[in-house]
Image (cartoon, grey):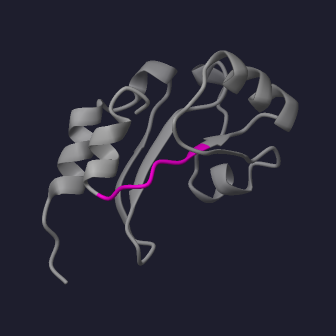
Amino acid sequence: MRDDYEKFTAVDAEVLAISAESVPAAQSFLKSHPLPYPCVVDADHTVFDAYDVTSRLMSLGQRPGLFVIDEAGTVLFDNVGNQQFNIPDNAKVLEVLETPRSA
């Protein structure tokens, strides 16, 4: 997402990262890996649990989740992987964003 951030904003998408770590851990990560979009902390996993992006033993930590949610709160696309490499590529997410929807 970081590398194609301008492509996402060009289609009026807002990108938001959510960290399941503590504030200090998230700040440490962001210091080394700055993002051009906001990152919020969900240390108590409220959002992660609501979207079933919970840690699983076989995932060796937090499972990656990616969601496209429209202005009305409708989930248009969701992907929860088992490993960090299970994140859909940006082209797939942009395709979802660029697909016309009926009003």
Q: Which residue is more in the foreground, 60 or 8? A: 8
- Kindly identify the residue that appears in the image at 43 percent across and 51 percent down: 67
Residue 89 picture location, percent across and down = 29, 30
- Residue range of the region highlighted in magenta in the rendering: 12-17
Q: Main secondary structure of the magenta part?
A: loop
Quadrant where the N terminus sits is top left
- Kindly identify the residue that appears in the image at 36 percent across and 55 percent down: 13
Question: In this rendering, is residue 57 above or below 102?
Answer: above
Question: In this rendering, is residue 92 above or below 103?
Answer: above
Residue 13 part of the magenta segment: yes
- Kindly identify the residue that appears in the image at 15 percent across and 79 percent down: 102
Q: Residue furthest bottom?
A: 103
Q: Which residue is more in the foreground, 10 or 17? A: 10
Quadrant where the C terminus sits is bottom left
Would residue 51 be found to the left or right of residue 55 on screen? left
For residue 92, which quarter of the picture? top left
Q: Which residue is more in the foreground, 7 or 81? A: 7
